Amino acid sequence: MLKVQLEGQRIRVRVDEALLARLRAGESLVAHTRLPPAPDFRITLRLVDGERPLWDGSPALGAMLGLPRSRVEHYAERLPCRQGLLLDLQLPEGVGLSIEFSVDVRDSLSVRGPRTRTD
């Protein structure tokens, strides 16, 4: 399951454990929506090197959202958890974009089991 929600200058992306594993293995994930007669709308999600998210988009081709690999790996170590990975991205012309990346907590619990506390 790959869910993408867009609202104003906020993007929320949620995946399940299987897609997280594919993403961590280097695959790109694609959310695809057909909107005839306009071109199809696509968002491609992938991991990128560096500490900042990347955004590259065009009306004809869709968009690519690159999440920082190190931040996603650190987030994955905390799973299962309800809080997602929160990122901010500055776009041209002073436009900001808030990004939330999360793994479905119910799926994560069923795959990983409850997280044990290490106090």
Image (cartoon, grey):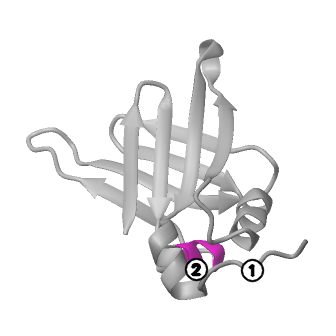
The residue that appears at 55% across and 40% down in the rendered structure is 56
Q: Position of residue 61 (x, y in %)?
A: 37, 45
Answer with left or right where residue 28 lies relative to residue 118.
left
Q: Residues within 10 Å of mark 1 (few under 14, many from 20)?
A: few
Q: Residue furthest top?
A: 93
Magenta span: predominant SS is helix
x, y percent for residue 6: 39, 37
The three-letter amino acid code for the residue at tag 1 is Thr
Q: Disc 1 vs disc 2: which is toward the camera?
A: 1
Compute the Cα span from label 1 to label 2.
21 Å
- Residue, x 61% and y 53% (percent of image)? 84
Residue at 57%, 40% (x, y): give it: 99
- Quarter where residue 88 is shown: top right
For the record, the magenta segment spans 20-25
Label 1: state its secondary structure: loop
- Pick whichever of labels 1 and 2 is earlier in the sequence: 2
SS of the residue under disc 2: helix
Which residue is identified by label 2? 21
Q: Is residue 110 above or below residue 98?
A: below
Query: In the picture shown, does residue 69 fall above or below 108?
Result: above
